[in-house]
C-alpha cells in the first residue's frame, strides 16, 4: 500500500512544481470559457441556457491537453521503465498516476467552475449541481484519457493523436454530464438517473482505464 | 422503374456506394500488383528472405 | 487441411489464391440477385422510392459493426493468443470497416434529406455511426502512423478492444441523448413489422455485402503479408550492405 501512496505523492509533487502544469489546466479552462461568449455573443439568456454545456466542453478540452504530460516525462527520463519492471502491478502504478493527475489537474477545474459559471450567468442555485456533475465526471475523463496517453506515449506521436483517440470514448461522459447538469437547472427531467449513470461511468473507467493503459504500455514498450 | 420525386437521392446513394466499393476493390487490386512487382524486383536482384539464408550461417 | 495451416503465412497465401476467385464470383452473383430484388421491391407508403436507400444504408451499418467485431477478435489473437496472422487480419479489416461506416453515413444523410428535410440530422443511429467512424479513424491512425508496424498493431489492437467495450455504451448514451433533445421522431423506425417484400431483399443485400467484406478482407490480408515480406527483404538487404562495408 505504501508504494502506491508514495507514487501518488511523488506524482502530485512533480505536477505542482513550476514545470508541472497543474494549474495550467485551470487556466486553460478559464480561457476557453472566456472565448465562448466571443463566438456565441453576449446574450445572457442564451449563455445561461448553454452554460453547463460550455463548462463541460471546457473541462473536457482542458483535461485532454493535460493528459499528454501523464506519461511523457516519465518515458523520457526512464522512470516509466522502472515502474514497469517494479514489483507493484503496473495497473496499480498507472492508477496511482491517474489519481494524482486528477487531484492536481481535474480537481482545480471543479474548484473554479463556480467562478466561471458566474461569467456565463448560470443560476447560483444550479452552480452547486453543475460542479457536482463535474466532480463525478472529471475522474472518468482522466481515466479514459489514461488509455490514449498510454497508447500515444509508446508511439511518440503526442498531442493530437491522443485527442483523436480519446474524444470519441468520452462521448458518453459528456452526454450524461451535461444531461445531469441541465436537469439540475431546467428542472422537469430528474437529476438522479443521468447523474447515477455518470457515476457508473466513472467507476467503470477506474477499472477499464488502468487495465487498458497497462496493456498499452506493456505491448507498446516491450 | 419509377423512383418517384426524390429519384436523385436514391441514384446518388447508389452512386456513392458503387464509388466507395470500387475504390476499395481498386485499392486491393493495385496494392497486390505493386507488392508482387516489388517482390519480383527484389528477388531478381538476389535478395532472399531469412528462411532461405539459414544455410549460410551453419558452415 | 487442418486449421493450423492458416497460421503459416505461405500456406495462407496459397489458400487465399485458391479461394478468392470463388468468393469474388459469389459476391457478384449475390449482388446481382439482390439488386434485382431491390428493383422490384415495393415503395414505402410514407417515403416512396427513397426506401430503396435503406437496402444500402442498413447493410452498411451492420457490416461496420461486424467489422469492428472482426477487429476485436483479431485483437485478442494479437494480444492474448499470439496468432501470427492476427495483427494482419486486424490491419486489413480497419480500412474496409471505415469505408462501410462512411457509406452508412452518406446514404443516411441522402436518405434524410427527402424524408426529414435536412442533410444531417442528429438522430441516434446516425450520431452513433459518426462516433464509430471517429473510432475507426483513430484505429487507422494507430496502424498507419506507427514507425514500428508491430507496435502500431498492438496499440491498435488495444484500442479495438477498448472500443468493443465502449461502443455499446456509446450507442446507449447517444440514444438517451436523442430522447432528451428531440421530440418523438416523425420517421417510423424500420424496426417494427417490416414486410417480407422489403425484408428479403434487405437480407440478400446484407449477405452480398458480407461476402464483399470477406473477399476484400482476404485480399487485403494477402497484400499486407506481401508488404511485410517486402519490408523484411529490404531490411535484410540493408543489413547485408552494412555488413559488407564494415
Image (spheres, coloured by chain):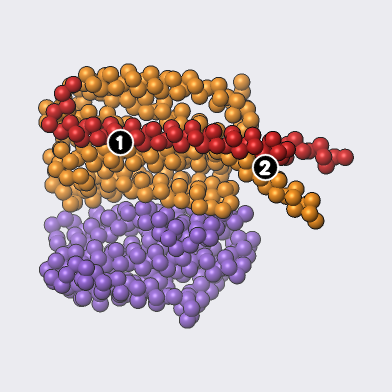
Chain colours: A purple, B red, C orange
Foreground: C34 or B42? Answer: B42
Residue at image location 38% in from the left, 61% down from the top: A141
In the image, C55 versus C226, the foreground residue is: C226
The answer for which chain carries disc 2 is C
Above or below, C173 against C59 in this view is: below
Q: Is residue C199 left or right of residue B18?
A: left
Furthest-bottom residue in this view? A18
The residue identified by callout 2 is C233
Q: What quarter of the picture does the C terminus of chain A occupy?
A: bottom right
Q: Where is residue B16 shown, x and y percent of the image?
A: 30, 36
Q: Position of residue C234 (x, y in %)?
A: 66, 45
Q: Residue at x 28, y 25 (%)?
A: C202
Asked which secondary structure carries label 1, the reply is helix
Position above or below: A142 against B58: below
Q: Is residue A78 left or right of residue C126?
A: right
Coordinates of residue C164 in the picture (x, y in percent): 42, 44
Q: Dot 2, crowdedness within 10 Å: few (<14), some or many (≥20)?
A: some
Q: Is residue A5 visible?
A: no
Residue B16: numbered disc: 1
Q: Quadrant of the N terminus of chain A?
A: bottom right
Which quadrant would residue C203 be assigned to in this image?
A: top left
Let me know if residue A15 appears in the view. yes
- In this rendering, the answer to whether A61 lies above or below C245 is below
Q: Chain of mark 1?
A: B
Graded by Cα atoms within 10 Å as few (under 14), some (14 to 19) or many (20 or more), the crowding at tag 1 reads some
Residue at the image position 25 percent from the left and 22 percent from the top: C38
Q: Label 2 near label 1: C-beta < 8 Å? A: no
The residue lying at 14 percent from left, 62 percent from top is: A186
C131 or A101: nearer the viewer: C131
Looking at the picture, do discs 1 and 2 lie on one chain? no
- Could you say whether the residue bearing mark 2 is in a helix, strand or loop? helix
Label 1 vs label 2: CA separation? 39 Å
Amino acid at each position: 500500500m505504501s508504494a502506491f501512496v508514495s507514487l501518488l505523492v511523488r506524482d502530485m509533487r512533480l505536477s505542482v512544481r513550476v514545470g508541472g502544469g497543474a494549474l495550467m489546466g485551470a487556466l486553460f479552462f478559464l480561457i476557453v470559457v472566456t472565448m465562448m461568449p466571443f463566438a456565441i455573443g453576449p446574450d445572457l439568456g442564451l449563455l445561461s441556457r448553454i452554460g453547463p454545456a460550455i463548462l463541460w466542453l471546457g473541462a473536457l478540452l482542458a483535461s485532454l491537453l493535460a493528459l499528454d504530460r501523464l506519461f511523457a516525462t516519465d518515458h523520457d527520463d526512464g522512470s516509466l521503465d522502472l515502474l514497469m519492471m517494479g514489483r507493484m502491478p503496473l495497473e496499480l502504478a498507472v492508477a496511482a498516476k491517474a489519481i494524482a493527475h486528477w487531484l492536481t489537474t481535474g480537481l482545480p477545474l471543479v474548484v473554479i467552475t463556480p467562478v466561471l459559471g458566474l461569467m456565463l450567468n448560470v443560476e447560483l442555485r444550479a452552480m452547486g449541481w453543475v460542479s457536482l456533475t463535474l466532480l463525478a465526471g472529471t475522474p472518468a475523463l482522466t481515466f479514459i484519457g489514461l488509455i490514449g496517453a498510454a497508447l500515444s506515449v509508446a508511439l511518440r506521436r503526442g498531442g493530437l493523436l491522443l485527442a483523436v483517440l480519446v474524444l470519441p470514448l468520452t462521448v458518453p461522459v459528456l452526454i450524461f454530464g451535461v444531461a445531469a447538469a441541465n436537469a439540475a437547472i431546467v428542472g422537469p427531467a430528474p437529476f438522479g438517473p443521468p447523474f447515477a449513470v455518470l457515476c457508473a461511468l466513472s467507476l467503470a473507467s477506474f477499472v477499464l482505464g488502468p487495465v487498458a493503459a497497462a496493456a498499452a504500455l506493456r505491448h507498446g514498450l516491450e | 422503374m419509377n423512383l418517384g420525386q426524390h429519384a436523385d437521392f436514391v441514384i446518388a446513394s447508389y452512386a456513392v456506394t458503387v464509388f466507395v466499393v470500387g475504390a476499395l476493390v481498386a485499392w486491393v487490386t493495385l496494392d497486390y500488383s505493386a507488392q508482387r512487382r516489388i517482390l519480383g524486383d527484389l528477388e531478381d536482384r538476389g535478395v532472399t528472405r531469412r528462411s532461405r539464408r539459414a544455410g549460410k550461417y551453419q558452415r | 487441411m487442418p486449421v493450423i495451416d492458416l497460421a503459416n503465412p505461405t500456406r495462407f497465401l496459397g489458400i487465399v489464391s485458391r479461394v478468392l476467385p470463388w468468393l469474388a464470383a459469389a459476391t457478384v452473383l449475390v449482388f446481382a440477385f439482390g439488386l434485382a430484388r431491390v428493383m422490384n421491391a415495393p415503395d414505402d407508403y410514407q417515403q416512396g422510392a427513397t426506401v430503396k436507400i435503406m437496402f444500402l444504408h442498413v447493410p452498411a451499418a451492420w457490416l461496420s459493426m461486424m467489422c469492428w467485431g472482426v477487429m476485436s477478435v483479431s485483437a485478442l489473437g494479437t494480444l492474448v493468443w499470439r496468432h501470427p496472422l492476427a495483427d494482419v487480419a486486424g490491419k486489413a479489416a480497419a480500412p474496409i470497416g471505415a469505408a462501410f461506416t462512411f457509406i452508412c453515413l452518406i446514404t443516411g444523410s441522402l436518405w434524410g434529406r427527402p424524408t426529414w428535410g435536412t442533410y444531417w440530422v442528429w438522430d441516434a443511429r446516425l450520431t452513433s455511426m459518426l462516433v464509430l467512424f471517429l473510432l475507426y479513424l483513430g484505429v487507422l491512425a494507430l496502424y498507419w502512423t506507427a514507425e514500428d508496424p508491430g507496435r502500431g498493431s498492438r496499440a491498435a489492437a488495444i484500442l479495438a478492444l477498448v472500443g468493443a467495450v465502449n461502443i455499446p455504451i456509446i450507442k446507449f448514451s447517444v440514444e438517451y441523448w436523442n430522447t432528451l433533445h428531440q421530440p418523438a421522431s416523425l420517421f417510423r423506425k424500420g424496426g417494427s413489422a417490416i414486410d417480407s417484400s422489403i425484408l428479403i431483399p434487405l437480407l440478400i443485400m446484407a449477405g452480398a455485402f458480407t461476402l464483399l467484406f470477406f473477399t476484400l478482407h482476404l485480399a487485403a490480408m494477402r497484400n499486407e503479408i506481401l508488404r511485410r515480406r517486402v519490408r523484411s527483404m529490404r531490411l535484410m538487404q540493408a543489413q547485408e550492405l552494412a555488413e559488407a562495408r564494415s
